[in-house]
Amino acid sequence: MATPEVQYTEASGARVAFQVFGEGPYDIVYAPSHVTHVELVWQVRPWAEFLGRLGQLGRVIVFDKRGTGLSDRSVGLPDMEQRMDDIRAVMDAAGSDRAALIGTSEGGTMCALYAATYPERCSALVLWGSLPRLRFARDYRGGVTDEELGEVDAWLEEHPWGERERMAGQAEWMLPSGTQGERQALVNMLVSGADDKSMRALNEMNREMDVRAALPAISVPTLVACWEKEHPHITNGSRAFGELIPGALFLELPGQGHLPFGTADDARAFATIEEFLRRSREGGTDGPEANRVLATVLFTDVVGSTDKAVELGDRAWLALLEKYYATVRLLLARYRGVEVNTLGDGFLARFDGPARAVRCAEEIVKAVRGLGIEVRAGLHTGECEKRGSDIAGIAVHVGARVASHAAPGQVLVSQTVRDIIAGSGISLQDQGSAVLKGVPGEWELYRVVGVAA
């Protein structure tokens, strides 16, 4: 098929390149692996054939993630929240209210977060060769140890992005059955899609992310798949996706490779995806119940409010509270926060992205200090149940307890927030573990100590 026209849209301060092609009964968003170039990808025959077959199933939307390809490169280190905005923006620009999301490799992680956060816009989810966390942890089998990462870093220093040996290895991994010409076309696309500086930033983001806590909130039909002879880090990561996403179908297909194309078993991979999308559509078109969503909750509380009220008197205190409310509401609007309710002199708000929530909390702390008020703030990301304009669930209780541990002028976040905002430019300081009243176990808390512009 001919190369589709490249279009552009704005996504939270970045220009994102995308294409739309195909036709069918539903929309499909394909979120690719780490680096693409939406024009040159069509010169990679196995990749182009895969996209062409998707275009026979439905209307397909593909894009270059910010920092790569024809999308804005000068965006610094991206985070998963901004990557979700890329999906939302291209869907809006293409006029797509709801779509099946297919994410491969790194693209699968961002699709999983998107499906948890915006269930009303996702009809089905396919995660291929993806993983929710890269680093080793006691409760995560198969992660990469610090020692292994050190060895990788040493090798990457000697083989920067674009260097012949490194790119040959990438091509062999991504297109194990590709011809020499197909692999060379892939290398041309990858090198045109990013430079070494961009790749270092992407690697840094991927090493720090951990989206496991978000996965139980996914309510859309989900297929998790990988090749049996894929790298063990990815097969273990795919298993983790399958275990943590409610009702997910997990498949390890016989074969070797990384993507659902470029292997000797392309036909099997595509048939698996096609059958899953067909069954998902036949299962109903009303979509998931959107009352269960992944959200970041923010609690703020005025410190010493009673003493301040006595000092000022009722009339002056009420006038000050009105200024406080107006300031907080202005900042909530700026950072796309939704006011849930006010609790005396405190606020409960929810956000669809944790980095925006943290930035908003920091702005609130600074802004109300100018009114002669000190506030404490706490944030947590988790599954929430929407009840009209209100929200409920354990995540709300955790957020409130996190806030109660904050000192005047502090913003504290849970480890879940820390894990998802990797790459956001937000600096955190470990505050150790704490017991949160009424919440089982111990919780790692982190203080916000810096927020990059």
Image (cartoon, grey):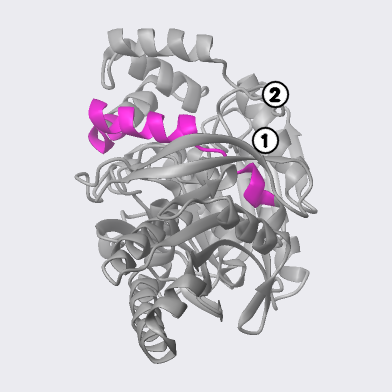
Taking the image as drawn, is residue 384 in sight?
yes
Q: Earlier in the sequence, mark 2 or mark 1?
A: 2
In reply to whether residue 413 is colored magenta, the answer given is no
Residue placed most toward the observer, 158 or 420 = 420
In the visual, does 140 lie left or right of 429? Answer: right
Q: CA distance from mark 2 to mark 1?
A: 17 Å
Percent position (x, y) of residue 67? 28, 43
Crowd band around label 1 with a 10 angstrom C-alpha radius: few (<14), some (14–19), many (20+): many
Residue placed most toward the observer, 77 or 183 = 77
Crowd band around label 2 with a 10 angstrom C-alpha radius: few (<14), some (14–19), many (20+): few
Q: Amino acid at mark 2?
A: Arg
In the visual, does 29 lie left or right of 234? Answer: left
The answer to whether 428 is drawn above or below residue 26 in the figure is above
Percent position (x, y) of residue 358? 42, 55
Taking the image as drawn, is residue 61 in sight?
no
Q: What span is colored magenta in the figure?
A: 189-215
Q: Farthest residue in the bottom direction?
A: 315
- Residue tagged 1: 238
- Residue tagged 2: 138
The answer to whether 25 is drawn above or below residue 70 in the figure is below
Secondary structure at numbered mark 2: loop
Percent position (x, y) of residue 371? 29, 72
Q: Amino acid at mark 1?
A: Ser
Taken as a whole, is the magenta stretch helix, strand or loop?
A: helix
Q: Residue at x 65, y 74 (%)?
A: 391
